[in-house]
Amino acid sequence: MKKKKILTSILALFLTFTLVGCSEKASIVMNEDGSIKTYTEEEIPEGLYVKKGDTYSPLLNTSPGEDVDSESNYQWFTEYDQLIPEMTENDKLILYSEGEVPEAFTFYKMTDFGYTVGIKFTQDEATKKLTFPSEANGYCPYSPVGDYILETTFSDGVSNVSIKEVNGKEFRETMLTTDGFMKGLTKDAMYKFWYYQGTVYKSVNIKADTHVFIEDYELSTGSYVELKDKTFEVNLPASIENGYWLIDGYGLFKYSGPETDLILDGNEEDLISGDEESAIEGNTEDISTDETGDTSNPETE
């Protein structure tokens, strides 16, 4: 009994959240207080880690199942920004494996898209009208919005759903990326969508709770430093830039190496012209936030 209590206490120090969204499962490993989990060399499970001094931090893997979904050109999650390990020029990328050693790693440069609602909006093939996706893979598995929309809107085989307005403005294709993500939203703000379900006009308040990263380009490396111990050090691609990177099969990390940006002296012409704020407004829709309603879950009227 005493051993059982000790084991229970040790396990309570760490928490693995397993979230289930419409039959998809995704696991996030972190400390009980929500901070990033770190290991010593003796404790690490097999995988890739950012090593800072004597501590090892796992990459953030938010994809359903055990591995990152290499078929996706994006990553999305809700409240786990603090679990993305940051790697500087003084840190190391470490591989621990008791079996296979990959011949190469693929690094995907990820553009930080910011926050949006956890939905990849679609267009009905027959009517060409914008609608909510009718399948679970069209929703972020960490946001409650997918379960809610699928249960309340598509549970009875309904297919004629057309979104008309958001926060009092016409819902248009220009508000979306080519992948169906809604642009220009404010983190944790509420957005009120009005839509037809058949002939019934309904509304739902949806929170912009989902952080999206979109693939830009890829690099690869198969170079190691064999440390003659428990692990190998993975050499980063020579042309790696600062920013967020997804390593195929392992997860997301942030690289913050030496600054290489061009520094202009006083005699150089300014390379940026025009009104920056106007340029930004020209590429996104101005959607005002709905300050009413419960901000924790979707609501309908």
Image (cartoon, rainbow, N blue to C red):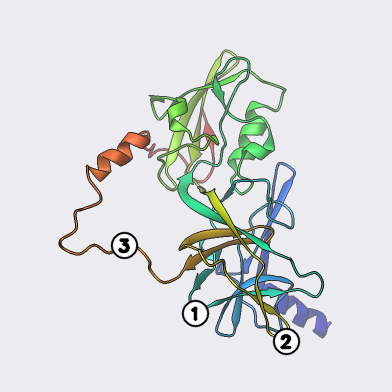
Name the kind of residue labelled 3 in the image: Leu
> Which amino acid, mark 2?
Asp
Against 260, residue 181 (above or below) is: above
Please name whichever residue, 204 or 28, is drawn nearer the observer in this view of the structure.
28
Q: Earlier in the sequence, mark 2 or mark 1?
A: 1
Q: State the image coordinates of residue 182 (x, y, percent, origin top left).
A: 48, 36
* Residue on which the image places disc 3: 262
Q: Nearer the viewer, residue 28 or 230?
A: 230
N-terminal of the pair, mark 2 or mark 3, is: 2
Nearer mark to the viewer, of 1 and 3 = 3
In this rendering, the answer to whether 152 lies above or below 140 is above
Look at the numbered disc 1 and give the secondary structure of its residue.
loop
Q: How many marks?
A: 3
**For the point 37% across and 38% down, which residue is it?**
289
Residue behind mark 1: 90
Which residue is identified by label 2? 229
Residue nearest the observer in this picture, 225 or 246: 225
Assess disc 2: are there few (<14), some (14-19) or many (≥20) residues with their C-alpha within 10 Å of its C-alpha: few
Residue that appears at 71% across and 41% down: 22
Q: Amino acid at mark 1?
A: Asn
Q: CA distance from mark 2 to mark 1?
A: 20 Å
How far apart marks 1 and 3 lie (CA) works out to: 23 Å
Quarter of image, res 92: bottom right
Label 1 close to label 3 by CB (< 8 Å)? no
Number of other residues with Cα within 10 Å of mark 3, as a class: few under 14, some 14 to 19, many 20 or more:
few
Element type at marker 3? loop
